[in-house]
């Protein structure tokens, strides 16, 4: 598959969408280790599994030329969640995925970050179908 132009870092509206780093692991593991936040992203995950999943997100950028952004609030430097494209081997299509901390949803930052990531997707893949699967009880994401 040919790699498309997908910007590795985007800054706008007080937030930065960027590639994940090893320094983001504690945030990532805490999110996936919490029943309240991990419920709709595969359920609670232990630290070793969270590490492997984060490593796959990081490697996805190299293998596919696009990926899931870490979303950072610029004013505080705090991570807020993620948004971007995911297409592991054997996946039927590119999927737009996202999840955020509860305060990012209530403050509107999740919506702004999602819109920013979707704009990047539409620019990089203007003719490609993109899907997103959301559990019907996940009201915040809906």
Image (cartoon, rainbow, N blue to C red):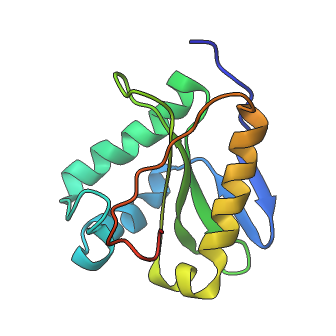
Q: Is residue 73 left or right of residue 61?
A: right
Q: Above or below — where is 123 with respect to 69?
A: above
Q: What is the x, y in percent for residue 106?
A: 55, 87
| Residue 113 in view here | yes
Specify the quadrant of the image occupied by residue 39. bottom left
In terms of depth relative to the viewer, which is nearer, 43 or 59?
Answer: 43
In terms of depth relative to the viewer, which is nearer, 92 or 100?
Answer: 92
Q: What is the x, y in percent for residue 109?
A: 65, 76
Residue that appears at 51% across and 49% down: 21
**Most distant residue in the front direction:** 136
Specify the quadrant of the image occupied by residue 17. bottom right
Residue that appears at 22% across and 75% down: 35
| Residue 77 in view here | no
Q: Is residue 47 left or right of residue 103?
A: left
In terms of depth relative to the viewer, which is nearer, 95 or 71?
Answer: 95
Q: What is the x, y in percent for residue 2?
A: 63, 13
Q: Above or below — where is 121 with respect to 18?
A: above
**Most distant residue in the top direction:** 1
Q: What is the x, y in percent for residue 36?
A: 28, 79
Q: Above or below — where is 95 with respect to 101?
A: above
Residue that appears at 20% across and 65% down: 44
Count of numbered marks: 0
Please state, as top left, top right, bottom left or bottom right, where the N terminus lies in the image.
top right
Specify the quadrant of the image occupied by residue 72. bottom right
């Amino acid at each position: 598959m040919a790699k498309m132009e997908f910007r590795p870092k985007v800054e706008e509206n007080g937030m930065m969408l960027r590639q994940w780093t090893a320094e983001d692991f504690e945030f990532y593991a805490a999110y996936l280790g919490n029943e309240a936040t991990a419920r709709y992203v595969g359920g609670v995950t232990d630290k070793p599994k969270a590490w492997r999943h984060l490593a796959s997100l990081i490697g996805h950028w190299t293998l596919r030329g696009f990926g899931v952004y870490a979303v950072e609030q610029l004013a505080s430097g705090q991570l807020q969640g993620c948004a971007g494209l995911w297409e592991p081997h054997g996946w039927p299509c590119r999927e737009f995925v996202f999840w955020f901390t509860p305060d990012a949803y209530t403050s509107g930052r999740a919506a702004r970050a999602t819109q920013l990531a979707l704009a990047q997707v539409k620019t990089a893949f203007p003719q490609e179908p993109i899907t997103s699967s959301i559990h019907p009880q996940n009201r915040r994401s809906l």
